């Protein structure tokens, strides 16, 4: 064989061997040094998840939501309970990194936090911590109307009067929730009560629809009133129902009171209003029946009228804090239906007053008209909010 043919055969055999070895090379790997590769795939992190609770420590300031965050893993569940076992509700965020309570931490309370977490490797652990809030140095309380499980008239507002000043009005208003059976539109408005205290009322845009079920949830516990106001340390709630659409229309010029129920005139009653020309005049506008007080001792000195009268008065129905009532006034019988001759109240006969007293309920509006009056009932003088337009009333909200 020639040298040329031998070289050709040698090259063919080398190519065949290389082709046979190629699959074997694809099935193995070597490092750059030519040694076998001993590296392994990275494993998921199984280190403990770091959980941070805010606030933390003892005697911390109340009034903030509880916030819990996780790093190096995920939160799977969180519970925050006080010493009585009451829970602060909240939800874990979608990414599992945080949890925030829906309610604020309240003053003078110990809280226990239990957080369940999951590491990247799937290990579940539970961590616990605790904190306490400082007690309230001053407490603000609330007087509210109407009372629970009552039936009231179509003009009845929800009214909260505070013992101490409320500077953080927006924060307080955010905690006041109204639910109705028919999605009634309404608004809160801040007033100065006749007593001089801060007050907030909720009234509908127009008179309530009869049969409406109304619930107030004032979730105030843990809310700071602001400077000189103190903390709220409890929640308040009331539920009530709206009765028939009943309106007392008082025309002081014709000296008549007309009771209208569900659009139908029930009865016309001759009355006598406040004496024209001075401080004894009646108020005009819309007043709301605040309370049926029965027999009341009425003394003119308590309303700044000197010693004009001091007597026991039957079938007394309060319309304002300043002392305007509808009531029996038999001593004024000569003026019923003829002239206004009272000290500011709407007087009628014993028989008419007894009948009328049985017909009406707190929350019924008295729509009073007349030329010679001492002005319109102010919003804080009883329930005078109806004397403001809807736009004017909305402007009294702290959230506008």
Image (cartoon, helix red, strand yellow):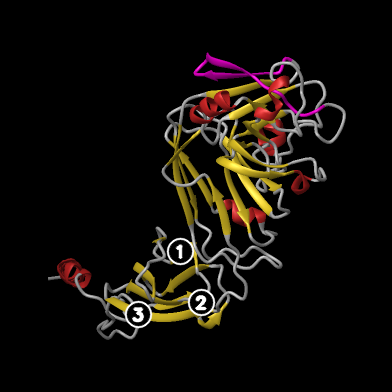
Left or right position of 374 against 43: right
User: Is 27 on the left-hand or right-hand side of 260?
Assistant: left
**Relative vertical location of residue 147 with respect to residue 230 in this rendering, above or below:** above
Q: Position of residue 206 (x, y in %)?
A: 59, 28
Which quarter of the figure has residue 229?
bottom right
Residue 192, image x and y in percent? 72, 49
Q: How crowded is mark 3: few (under 14 residues within 10 Å), some or many (20 or more)?
A: few
Mark found first going from the N terminus, 1 or 3? 1
Residue at which label 2 appears: 108
In the depicted view, which residue is nearer to us: 114 or 94?
114
The question of residue 335 being in magenta is answered with no
Residues rendered magenta in the picture: 254-275
Question: What residue do we see at 69% from left, 20% from top?
Answer: 336
State the image coordinates of residue 339 (x, y, percent, origin top left). 76, 19
Where's residue 208, x and y in %? 52, 29
Q: Mark 1 points at which residue?
A: 101
Kindly state the secondary structure of the residue where label 2 is placed.
loop
Circle 3 is placed at which residue position?
127
The tag earlier along the polypeptide, 1 or 2, is 1
Q: Where 156 falls versus 226 (above or below)? A: above
- Kindly report the distance in space between the C-alpha atoms of the residues bearing marks 2 and 3: 24 Å
């Amino acid at each position: 064989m020639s040298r040329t043919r031998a070289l050709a055969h040698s090259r063919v055999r080398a190519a065949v061997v290389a082709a046979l070895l190629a699959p074997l090379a694809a099935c193995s790997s070597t490092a750059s040094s030519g040694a076998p590769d001993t590296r392994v795939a990275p494993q998921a992190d199984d280190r403990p998840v770091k959980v941070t609770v805010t606030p933390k420590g003892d005697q911390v300031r109340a009034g903030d939501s509880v916030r819990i965050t996780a790093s190096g893993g995920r939160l799977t569940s969180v519970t925050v309970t006080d010493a009585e076992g009451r829970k602060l509700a909240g939800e874990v965020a979608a990414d599992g990194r945080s949890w925030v309570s829906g309610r604020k931490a309240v003053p003078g309370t110990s809280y226990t936090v239990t957080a369940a977490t999951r590491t990247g490797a799937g290990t579940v652990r539970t961590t616990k911590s605790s904190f306490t809030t400082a007690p309230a140095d001053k407490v603000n309380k609330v007087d509210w109307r109407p009372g629970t499980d009552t039936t009231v008239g179509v003009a009845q507002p929800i009214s909260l009067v505070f013992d101490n000043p409320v500077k953080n009005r927006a924060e307080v208003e955010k905690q006041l929730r109204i639910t109705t059976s028919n999605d009634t539109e309404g608004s809160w408005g801040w007033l100065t009560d006749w007593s001089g205290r801060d007050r907030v009322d909720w009234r509908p845009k127009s008179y309530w629809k009869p049969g409406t079920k109304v619930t107030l949830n004032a979730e105030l516990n843990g809310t700071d009133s602001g400077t000189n106001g103190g903390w709220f340390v409890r929640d308040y709630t009331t539920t009530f129902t709206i009765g028939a659409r009943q309106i007392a229309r008082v025309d002081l010029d014709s000296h008549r009171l007309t009771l209208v129920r569900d659009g139908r005139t029930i009865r016309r009653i001759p009355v006598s209003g406040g004496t024209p020309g001075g401080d004894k005049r009646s108020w005009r506008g819309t007043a709301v029946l605040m309370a049926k007080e029965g027999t009341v001792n009425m003394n003119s000195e308590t309303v700044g009228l000197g010693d004009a009268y001091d007597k026991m008065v039957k079938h007394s129905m309060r319309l304002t804090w300043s002392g305007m009532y509808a009531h029996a006034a038999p001593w004024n019988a000569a003026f019923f239906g003829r002239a206004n001759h009272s000290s500011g109240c709407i007087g009628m006969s014993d028989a008419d007053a007894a009948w009328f007293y049985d017909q009406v309920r707190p929350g019924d509006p008295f729509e009073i008209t007349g030329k010679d009056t001492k002005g319109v009932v102010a919003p804080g003088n009883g329930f005078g909010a109806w004397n403001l337009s809807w736009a004017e009333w909305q402007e009294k909200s702290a959230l506008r």
